[in-house]
Amino acid sequence: MNFLYPWLLIILPIVAGGAVWGLMVLKRRRRVARPPVGTRLANTVSFADLPEFPQIAQHHYVSSALGVVMALVAALGAVVLAARPADSQMITPQERARDVVLCLDVSGSMYPVDSGVIKQFREIVKGFEGERVAMSWFNSSSVTLFPLTDDYGYIDETLKPLERQFQAVADALIWDDLQVLPDEDWPDDSGTLLGSGSSLPGDGLISCLSLFDDSDTERSRSVILATDNMVEGEPIFELYEALDMAADANVNVYALCAELPSISLTDDDEAYLAAAEEMEEEVERVGGRFFATTDQQSVGEIVESILDQTAGLVEGTPRRVIHDRPVWGMVLLGAGLVGLAIWGGWRWRRPWLVWLRRGGMVVLIGVMIWNPAFGIDKVKVVAIDCDVVVLVDTSASVAAEDWDGDAPRLEGIKADLEGIAEHHSGAHIAIVSFDSSARLLMPLSTDPGAARAAAGTLAPVPVWRASGSTIDSALPVLKEILERQRKDHPERARLVYYLGDGEQTNVFEAESFKEVGRMIDGGAVLGYGTAEGGKMLGHWETVLGEETGRPEYIQDEMGRPGISRIDEDALKRIAQELGVSYSHRTADSAVAGSLWDGKLPDRVMDDETSAQRPLGFLLAIVILGLLVWELIVLLGRAQVAKAARDLATARAQERAWPPVGRVA
């Protein structure tokens, strides 16, 4: 049997026992100090000399002793109930939810209106309840701001400063003096200019479609695409092609088109209007809905339309549920009170007090059976107080086929990532993917399901966006996370895991990780690949399980299949700079043996259950107090009964002849 408040099993008996002992001592002292009362009468016979007295005294003593025993049994039941016997378990409820991806154009022509669009995004998210939301923004290339999550507080914290920054840029455009803006007022859209051209909504939409996970699950999926459709350069995918892919994947498209702003970065107003008309036509062709960013009704209509869609079943957030098990406590308490009614007696000097005391206990038991509750119940759970940041190489080289024979390295990385999440269960885990640039794939979360979902979405950088591999590209994002967490949560430990092959195709020398090494408590560098290397199958963007292009092996300058090889020297150097161990990973060994296993601080967290807090344990404490009163009275009665029995025994020995102990 488990107890939610096991410390009461020790505290309550000590307090109750101390109260009984103290009050009995006080009662004895008052009896000794009290002068004898009563009047002696002549020609009377002592009650103790009556022949029936021994039998009455013995019966009175046995009844009093049984009453004390029954009171103790009832008190034990009250203590058990006060400690709240219960079972608790973690459950993962099935919830109906919808997935929504916010897709924002951050090209120069959109800067004047992006602040208003982000404000609309924030309003849309406020209308959701349980829907998962992701966001990606794009120019010539795309960057994921956050993956699918239902943490609306985190979403708003991410979007709120971006709204302010874009508004600052829009205000500066009015005065045509962008240089007056400090760096912190510029939105950090790094990674969106890796391709050629600008404002490529087709490519941006394809990247947003790739954020949907669990392609085998039937659920509602929607994309809210905000762009002015002012395409410059040659996109990989035209907008109509991306919209066709969305329609084939049953993804609902809502378009927010930027109308001609008062301050525009283009002088061709006719082209601007033509782009908007083309976008409206294409979106409505595939059954989508088109809105202007200035449409005041768009937020409400989009939210209403999304919520009207049939939701799919998904796993909800794991919750701890408590099941009370009061049966044995109630049995002990009930049996004790029944025994009191039989052997404890009701004939007292003040019978109304007996009725009040025992009747009150019966009423309280009835209230406990009714089981009133208040508030939200919480149970303390001890978890690891640690931030774990995992850097995952997603450059084209992770597709090299030299893991466990001829499988891609990424298979080993995915499996090990899940092993890291399991090994550090309860810790705050973040995942950063990197190739030539880095992006936060999963913000810090204690949800192991989120880590598994993020691992499932890992894929090599698409061939059309690949621009080499840089082993230190994740450093800026990593430093930002560690510095923020060190400031906000200095009590936590910090671990960093680096998963990659160490291959550097960038001509520049990699930056040192020593600064990061001084900020962390541990971690590990895990290497993947072989010295012989393997061929790399080029990856195309995947939309709900379907690749958008025909995969082909990457070739070198000579037209031969490119070979990627592990660079263990580079990986060992990173491990040395971080101050952690290095392990070369193979499929025949468990990742747990390669992970940091030092002592980590614990944290006590309150995990809300789905039930309210019952009042039963408080009522049991009140019943225990009444039983303490009952015990004091019964023990006093038992002392009197023992004295009467001893007197009867002594008188019987005096009347015996020959005297007991003497031989005639």
Image (cartoon, grey):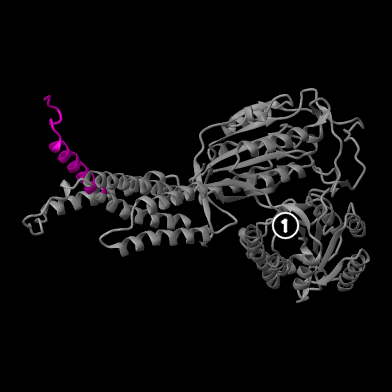
Q: Quadrant of residue 129?
A: bottom right
Q: Residues within 10 Å of mark 1 (few under 14, many from 20)?
A: some
Horizontal arrangement in the rendering, residue 228 relative to residue 612 (left or right): right
Q: Does 510 sit above or below residue 663?
A: below
Residue at 77%, 59% (x, y): give it. 100
Residue sitting nearer the eye, 438 or 320: 320
Examine the rendering and report whether any part of residue 3 can be seen.
Answer: yes
Residue at 94%, 66% (x, y): give it. 285
Residue sitting nearer the eye, 630 or 422: 630
Which segment did they paint magenta? 638-664
Horizontal arrangement in the rendering, residue 466 relative to residue 151 (left or right): right
Residue at 48%, 61% (x, y): give it. 367
Horizontal arrangement in the rendering, residue 252 relative to residue 303 (left or right): right
Residue carrying label 1 = 132
- Residue 201 picture location, percent across and down: 84, 59
The stretch drawn in magenta includes residue 492: no
